[in-house]
Image (cartoon, coloured by chain):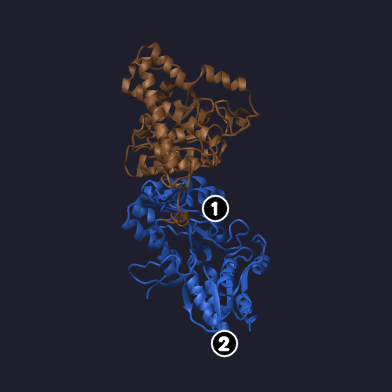
Chain colours: A brown, B blue
Amino acid sequence: MSARKVKEKKGPDEYPKALLAQFYKTMSTIRSFEKKVEEKFLAGEIPGFVHLYIGEEAVATGVISNLSREDLIQSTHRGHGHTIAKGADLKRMMAEIFGKKEGCCKGKGGSMHIADLGVGMLGANGVVGGGFNIATGAALAIKMQGKDNVSVVFFGDGASNRGTFHEAANMAAVWDLPVLFVCENNQYASTTPYRTTTSVDDIADRAAGYGMPGVIVDGNDVFAVYEEARKLIERARRGEGPALLECKTYRVKGHFVGDPEQYRTKEEVNKVCESNDPIDRFECTVLDGKLFSREELDGIKASAVKEVEEALEFARNAAEPEVSQLFADVYA
Amino acid sequence: MREITFSQATLEAMDEEMTRDERVFVMGEDIARQGGIFGQFKGLPDKFGKDRVRDTPISETAIVGAAIGAALTGMRPVADMHFADFMGVCMDEIFNQMAKIHYMFGGQRPVPMVLRAPDGLINQAAAQHSQSIEAWFMHIPGLKVVIPSNPADAKGLLKSAIRDDNPVIYFEHKALFNTRGPVPDGEVLTPIGKAKVVREGSDVTLVSYSRCMGLSLEAADVLAGEGISVECIDLRSISPIDKETLLASVAKTTRLVVAHEAVKQGGVGAELSAIVAEEGIDLLDAPIVRVGAPFTPVPFARPLEQAYRVTSEKIAEAVRGLF
């Protein structure tokens, strides 16, 4: 049994225009947010470690557009995109990344540990592969509580080599839990080309070992991601158990901001940026199909940029936590 | 007062808490169909069903990780670790996830869950099924660690742990499961973070917990016959630690001995000694003495295990050395 590769899909004109606008707004917001974070990290305003989601926007957008606020997601160290797509407040996110008191984690977490449980975002994770089992447990709670929500865990190709993936996949499958495992295969496990340390070409093939469907999509095509995620999420809501969706994408930026990227050429990166950028591809599709005018798209993008600017302003002006807060929240 | 076993006391705690709060459930290896490797879950699946008393895959990482996810989303899971020794398998889930989520997410959501960890020496089970590893966890902010020595506290601490909004690790000594002791009828809740003076004395403070507590009381009996009055403290919680009770007792007796089954190096005794050295050095009339296992893995062969094991004689001998 090998994973199913998706070939056919709906035409873009079959989607409601509001949904298409939402795709574009979310992807543009993520791109704009990440560019701003990169700029301010390099300028020394943002401390810690930062991992950017640039180039992978279609995955978070396509998957999470299928979710309600009550559905749950578990993210990774590269988690800003998922958090934005799930509807977290941009101002409080940016303030968190700046280490401010008004941050969504009161400045205790930072970029790698961002979380907004109020919108069903159960947390980024500084440990690669740390989220699989937490997501599985959230799905167990959903099932025990008799709800029809789903729990989605995002992970990279590298994380699929953690034992946590295999334990979670087995547990979710044997208990028929509503989990969607979304692999963002961005070609690099930290700084290592994934195929040099991973036994299969397609991570989705690993689903077969746990008796669950594995589906492969073009992760830079937001329509394809949305459509396949929708089918697997609906299946999980019906109680038919977990599935694995592998989204083939590409990490345009280094593993972290500041990565010297000695493991690949600039030409390789440029080629993807020029020919396979998920936002450019979306624009071409909707402009070619005359579903949006250039002005409409520019208007949406401008509103995304403005919201990010406002978030930045908020974060810069926010107060740092008082030292007395060091001891707050160690215990509930 | 009625007497029941330690194991029955934990069963009563589970039964009462699962009845009181439908969010409480338990999962682990061999607990539903087998009733627990030590029989400590027998009968629970019949009453609460196999959804709430759940057999898991042999996947400690998934067990603890799933408990965290469930705790974050409205449940109050109890996860059984089978043997405390296996907690090394899921250490990331314990110390990077479970312990830190409340703090690093700015207190957004508590992580109310309990890990039950059967520990200690029994039946010459050797290096990977006999350890006392409680001290590892007192080094991790965000965790609470409790360790009862008798049936009443076994019940009272387990009930308190289940009701606590923080992750609590509950160590239960395997050799205590079949021991009997008085347990009051009705609600029994032992406060977490509060030690108990279980025997008053005037010459020396002897602090212990878990199985070594009984050995310490035996030693105190023997020493009383020799004219040494021992005050025995059952620590009950090792994080948070009850400094107040410890220092008040040392102020009275001026001497401190700590006894535990875990290896002496880096153990709970080291922390207690440091607390007294830092905050009460003037109270002491004698050096602090620690009794613990030697710095070796737990050996298998009987004479080696006997040599390794802390006994009431070894504790009594340590106390005598102070006089």
Residue B11, percent from left and from top = 40, 61
- Left or right: where A147 falls relative to A220: left
Q: Within the image, what quadrant is residue A314 found in?
A: top left
Residue B221, percent from left and from top = 54, 82
- Contact? badges 1 and 2 (CB < 8 Å): no
Q: Which mark is residue B87?
A: 1
* Label 1: how many Cα within 10 Å (few below 14, some 14–19, many 20+): some
Q: In the structure shown, which secondary structural element does the residue marked by tag 2 occupy?
A: helix
Of A73 and A143, the residue lying toward us: A73
Q: Within the image, what quadrant is residue B320 found in?
A: bottom right
Q: Which residue is mark 2?
A: B225
Q: Chain of mark 2?
A: B
* Quadrant holding the C terminus of chain B: bottom right
Question: Could you tell me the amino acid type at mark 2?
Answer: Gly
Query: What residue do we see at 49% from left, 38% from top?
Result: A76
Query: What residue do we see at 59% from left, 67% from top?
Result: B261
